[in-house]
Image: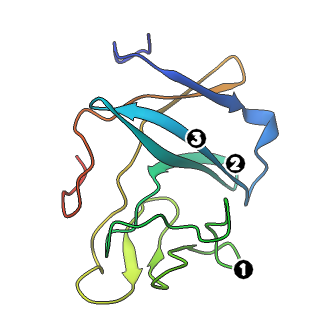
Amino acid sequence: MGRQGRKRYLVGPVSELAPGQSRKFMLRIAGVDEECFLINVDGRLHAYVNRCRHIPLPMDWVDNQFFTEDCSYLMCQTHGALFVPETGECVAGPGNSCGKRLFRVPLEVEGGLIYALPPAVAPEPGLEPS
């Protein structure tokens, strides 16, 4: 159990995820197995459900590729929408996707290991994260 009193899932060692790298993992959220991804942004870890906010499709069309070439943004490979890695906010993209955020997955780091915690609410298309 995590510090928040919820079940937590081991994603992997911090040492295996260098800045600018990502790692996909599965997480059970509200009874459904969801594909998620973990990113390292200059030593800070963030995780999101692998789902674009424009149309609910996975963000990576090349397995485990989420960053733009210069690692400034996360990019939906289907629509070209750009998201700020630290916040998940969409800053460029089709339709009404700007201003929406990727669905964040809470993380805990303990003893050099990264754990993901299921969000309190299930991610749904159009649902803003809490």
Q: Earlier in the sequence, mark 2 or mark 3?
A: 3
Foreground tag (1 vs 2): 1
Q: Is residue 103 above or below residue 99?
A: above
Q: Earlier in the sequence, mark 1 or mark 2?
A: 2
- Model colouring: rainbow
Quadrant assignment, res 22: bottom right
Is 13 left, or right, of 50 in this rendering?
right
Determine which residue is flagged by label 2: 43
**Which residue is drawn at the image coordinates 76% and 44% (left, top)?**
17
CA gap, disc 1 and disc 2: 18 Å
**Which residue is drawn at the image coordinates 40% and 16% (left, top)?**
7
**Where residue 46 is drawn, which disc sits there?**
none
Q: Amino acid at mark 1?
A: Glu
User: Crowdedness of circle 1 by 10 Å Cα count: few (<14), some, many (20+)?
Assistant: few
Determine which residue is flagged by label 1: 69
**Which residue is drawn at the image coordinates 32% and 73% (left, top)?**
55
- Percent across and percent down for residue 125 are 23, 61
SS for dot 1: loop
